[in-house]
Image (tube, rainbow, N blue to C red):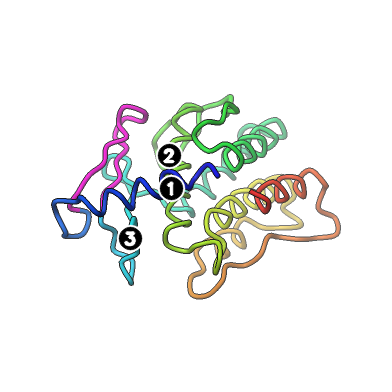
């Protein structure tokens, strides 16, 4: 599983952290993405061991930011961009940081422009938190953001089936198990394939 090793890594950092106050410790990822840091311990209720907050300079990206950025990417790049995102998400789900399928065009996230590798690193660490805070056994873990990101592609390419406002609402919902993946009898098989990769990761 491409996420298990770094869950253990973050849990290990908790065992040795010198500062106990919220976000008082920093693990730098700046050699891979300028300005990218993990700050821990996190602030989630219950203090899950390994929880952290991802920062890109002073900006703390959320899944909602990424959903909107994916939607905008597909709007700019058209059908080729949508296919590129789907292939990228499948590779990220299957291979994590070791994947080789990168986006061909820069990914823009709240004023930050990322190349293909930088996008992979940022999204990997952003979604990894879900397996720590909302484990797959009870919730959906990393599958939740990957499903929402796929839904953002659908919202761009098939807005009559699924609107971006609905995807954002599904992404920001908290309290209980997240909404399952979007289903519709007119949804093309290409999206079913991506959902299948995510659900079987």
For the view shown, which residue lies furthest in the left direction? 18
Q: Secondary structure at mark 2?
A: helix
Crowding at mark 3 (Cα within 10 Å: few <14, some 14-19, many 20+): some
> Which residue is the site of mark 1?
126
Query: Where 22 falls versus 112 (above or below)?
Result: below
The image position of residue 157, as x and y in percent, is 72, 45
Seen at 47% across and 57% down, the residue is 130
- Which quarter of the picture shows residue 14? bottom left
Q: Is residue 26 magenta?
A: yes
In whole angstroms, how far apart are the C-alphas of marks 1 and 3? 16 Å
Q: Is 139 located above or below residue 54 in the figure? A: below
Query: Which of 113/28 is in front?
Result: 28
Q: Please report the residue visible at 56 percent of the width from the left and 31 percent of the height from the top.
A: 99
Are the residues tagged 2 and 3 within 8 Å (C-beta)?
no
Q: Earlier in the sequence, mark 1 or mark 3?
A: 3
Mark linked to residue 122: 2
> Which span of residues is magenta-colored?
24-40
Dot 3: element: loop
Could you say where residue 9 lies in the image, as x and y percent from the top left?
35, 45
* Farthest-out residue, bottom: 176
Of tags 1 and 3, the one toward the viewer is 3
Residue at image mark 3: 49
Residue 51: image location, x then y, percent: 34, 57
Q: Give the side of residue 70 with respect to residue 27, left or right.
A: right
- In the depicted view, which residue is nearer to us: 147 or 113? 147
Asked whether the residues under the numbered discs 1 and 2 touch, taking CB atoms below 8 Å apart as contact, a structural biologist would say yes
As measured in the structure, the alpha-carbon distance from the residue carrying label 2 to the one carrying label 3 is: 21 Å
């Amino acid at each position: 599983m491409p996420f298990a090793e770094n869950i253990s890594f973050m849990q290990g950092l908790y065992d040795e952290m010198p500062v106990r106050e919220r976000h008082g410790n920093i693990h730098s990822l700046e050699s891979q993405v300028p300005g990218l840091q993990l700050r821990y311990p996190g602030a989630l209720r219950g203090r899950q061991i390994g929880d952290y907050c991802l920062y890109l300079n002073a900006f703390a990206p959320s899944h909602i930011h990424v959903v909107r950025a994916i939607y905008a990417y597909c709007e700019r790049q058209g059908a080729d961009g949508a296919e590129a995102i789907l292939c990228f998400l499948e590779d990220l789900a299957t291979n994590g940081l070791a994947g080789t399928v990168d986006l061909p065009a820069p990914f823009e996230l709240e004023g930050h422009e990322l190349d293909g590798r930088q996008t992979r690193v940022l999204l990997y660490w952003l979604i990894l938190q879900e397996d720590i805070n909302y484990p797959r056994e009870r919730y959906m873990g990393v599958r939740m953001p990957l499903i929402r990101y796929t839904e953002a592609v659908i919202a761009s390419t098939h807005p009559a089936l699924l609107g971006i406002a609905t995807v954002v609402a599904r992404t920001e919902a908290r309290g209980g198990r997240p909404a399952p993946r979007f289903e519709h009898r007119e949804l093309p098989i290409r999206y079913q394939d991506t959902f299948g990769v995510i659900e079987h990761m």
